[in-house]
Image (cartoon, rainbow, N blue to C red):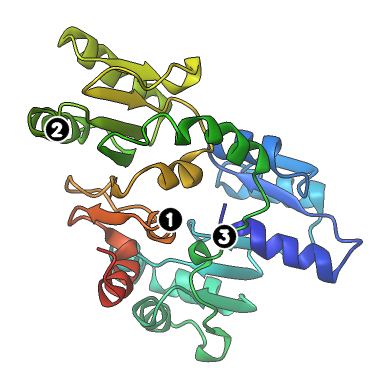
Amino acid sequence: MAAIPVFRQCARRRPGLTILMITTTMSAFCEIGSNCSLFRLNQFCPVDTPAAIDAFLCYWKPSAVILLESELWPNLIMVSSTKMSVKSFKFWSAWALPLISLMLSKFALIIPLSTTQAIRFQLLQAPPSIINFAGDLKYVVEHDMSKRNIASTEDLKEQPSDRHVWMAASVHRGEEQVILAVHRLLVRRYPDLVTIIVPRHLQLAHHIVEELQKEGLHVALRSRKQKITARGLVYMVDTLGELRHLYSLTPIALVGGSFCPGFAGHNISEAAAAGCAVLTGFHVGHFSHMINEMQRLDPL
C-alpha cells in the first residue's frame, strides 16, 4: 500500500503513463484490484529466476522498474523506499559481494529508509551518488483511497463506545496465545472488555476462533457482520483491507509480528496516526528506525 502514493504522483505528472502493479501475495492482489482504479494492470510477481524474469520483462517491456521493500532483482533500474536488513546484508556481503556490487551499480536511484540502511548499501559498494533520502513511504497515507472501507467500518464506531476496547493487529501464528492470555487477564478486571484481533493472515483467524470456542468465550466475526454485544467479547476481524480504519475504534493498539524471535515487526505509524497508544514487542527488525522515531515523539 505504500507504493500507491508514489504511483499516483507519477500518474499526475505523466497522464498518459501506464502503470503495471505486481504483487507477491493474494491479499495485496485483491486489495489493489478492489480499491484502487489507478492500476488497470495488476499481476502477480514472476518467479525470481532468470528465465521467468526475462520472459516477464520482454512481454511487458517496461521503461522503468520500481521495487519497494522486497528482494533485489538483477534487472532493476530503480529501487525506492528499500530495506537492507541485517540478514540480507550478511548474506550478500559474506560471499556474493561481487554480484551485489555489480547489481547495485546498475541502479539509477536507491532510496533507503534510514542512515543505517544507506550505510549498508554503501558497504555493499553501491555508488554514493545514487543514494538519496525521501523518508519512509509508510508515513504517507492516502485518505481518499478507500472510501468504501471507511464507510464499511462506520457501523462499528457506535457499538463499543461505552466499553473498554483494545486491539491486537497483524497477529502472527505463535502470538495468539500471548494475546488470548492478556484478554483473559483483562476481562477479570474489565468485564465489559472488547478485544479486537486482526490476524496477519486469514487462516490464523479460523484457528483462533476454534480455540476461543473451545474455551466457551464469546466471539463475533467481522465477515458475518456480527454485533459487538456480549461482555468479555473477542471481535475477530477475518476480512482484508480494513486495519487502518479499525485503529480509530480503539485507544490502545498492540502491533504484532514482534513478539517471537525471527519476526521483523510491522508498520506502527497507522496506529500512531489514529491516536492510539502503541504497544509492540522487541523483534521489530527493519522497523527499528520507525520505533526509534516514535519513541522520540512518545506515542509508544
Q: From the top left corner, tell me how far across and down residue 164 is, in percent.
A: 25, 37
Mark toward the viewer: 3 or 1 = 1
Determine whether 160 is above or below 219 in the image: below
User: Marks 3 and 2: CB-CB under 8 Å?
Assistant: no
Residue found at the far right of this picture? 16
Q: Secondary structure at mark 3?
A: loop
Q: Given the image, on which type of amino acid does mark 2 rest?
A: Tyr
For the residues marked 3 and 1, what is the alpha-carbon distance in whole angstroms?
A: 11 Å
Q: Given the image, on which type of amino acid does mark 3 rest?
A: Val
**Image mark for residue 274:** 1
Q: Given the image, on which type of amino acid does mark 1 rest?
A: Ala
Q: Secondary structure at mark 1?
A: loop
Determine whether 154 is above or below 143 in the image: above
**Image mark for residue 141:** 3
First of labels 3, 2 by sequence position: 3
Q: From the top left corner, tell me how far across and down residue 143 is, in percent.
A: 62, 55
Q: From the top left corner, tell me how far across and down residue 107 is, in percent.
A: 61, 75
Determine whether 81 is above or below 150 in the image: below
Mark toward the viewer: 3 or 2 = 2
Residue at horizontal 11%, vertical 31%?
A: 181
The quarter of the displayed image where residue 148 is located: top right
Residue holding disc 2:
190
For the residues marked 3 and 2, what is the alpha-carbon distance in whole angstroms?
A: 34 Å
Residue at horizontal 27%, vertical 77%?
A: 296
49 lies left or right of 199: right
Residue at horizontal 39%, vertical 56%?
A: 267
Near-viewer residue (249 or 259): 249
Mark toward the viewer: 1 or 2 = 2
Note whether residue 263 is visible: yes
74 lies left or right of 195: right
